[in-house]
């Protein structure tokens, strides 16, 4: 997650690149003639900076840095703590800060559903990113669904079997857990 976080935070450098537009704008305000090529280049720099910032924000909100499954007897014992069977999904916000979302395991749509454990492990290893769909209105998606990107090839697992159960799923509506 560190390289993604660094990319998102370097988005601030887009502001410096967008300052390229200040030169032609200042010339135009001062009444000086601004060459057309300079205006086009400044507009291209601003457009590229905006597009890059939007793409990085989109990616940071969907790339999963950590998945944590809360089981019975784990976590805080306060009234605001999520109940057992909750998946905590950690992504980044638009500025590179960690954003945790609590999701019920039953709302996770397993990306490797229908595959056996061995076939699922091979499929996960062959894909750099898995699309993890989450149903439910608490995820921030407009239609009640949100798609996240999970990298299992570069992941460090505390419990590989539980992760594969979540990715393969089960017929009981709990993601096989």
Image (spheres, helix red, strand yellow):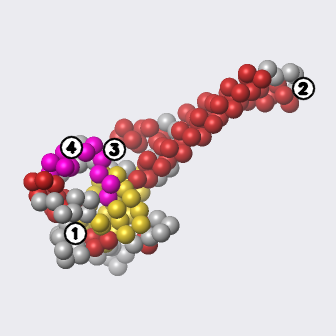
Quadrant (top left, top right, bottom left, bottom right) of the N terminus: top left
Which of the two residues, 100 or 45, is positioned nearer the viewer here?
Answer: 45
- The quadrant of the image that shows the C terminus is bottom left
Residue 128 visible (yes or no): yes
Measure the C-alpha gap from mark 3 to mark 4: 20 Å
Sequence-wise first label, 4 or 1: 4
Closer to the eye: label 2 or 4: 4
> How far apart are the alpha carbons under marks 4 and 1?
22 Å
| Quarter of image, res 115 | bottom left
Identify the secondary structure beneath mark 2: loop
Q: Which residue is mark 1?
A: 175
- Inspect the magenta stretch and tell me whether residue 113 lies in it: no
Number of other residues with Cα within 10 Å of mark 3, as a class: few under 14, some 14 to 19, many 20 or more: some
Q: Position of 59 compared to 35: left or right?
A: left
- As helix, strand or loop, the secondary structure at mark 3 comes to loop
What residue does disc 3 label?
Answer: 1
Residue at x-position 54% and y-position 45%: 54
Q: Which residues are magenta?
A: 121-132
| Marks 1, 2: nearer the viewer | 1
Q: Residue at label 2?
A: 31
From this view, report whether residue 158 is shown above or below residue 141. Answer: above
Which mark identifies residue 147?
none
Q: Residue 159 appears in which quarter of the rendering?
A: bottom left
């Amino acid at each position: 997650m560190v390289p993604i976080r660094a990319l998102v935070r370097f988005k601030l450098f887009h502001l410096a690149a967008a300052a390229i537009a200040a030169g032609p704008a200042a010339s135009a305000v001062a009444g000086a003639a601004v060459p057309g090529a300079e205006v086009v280049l400044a507009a291209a720099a601003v457009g590229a900076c905006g597009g890059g910032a939007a793409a990085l924000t989109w990616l940071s909100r969907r790339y999963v840095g950590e998945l944590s499954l809360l089981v019975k007897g784990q976590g805080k014992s306060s009234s605001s703590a999520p109940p057992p069977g909750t998946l905590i999904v950690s992504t980044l916000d638009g500025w590179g800060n960690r954003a945790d979302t609590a999701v019920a395991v039953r709302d996770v749509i397993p990306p490797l559903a229908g595959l056996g454990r061995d076939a699922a492990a091979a499929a996960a290893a062959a894909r750099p990113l898995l699309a993890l769909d989450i149903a439910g209105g608490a995820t921030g998606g407009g239609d009640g669904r949100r798609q996240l990107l999970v990298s299992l090839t570069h992941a460090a697992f505390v419990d590989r079997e539980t992760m594969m159960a979540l990715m393969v799923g089960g017929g009981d509506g709990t993601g096989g857990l």
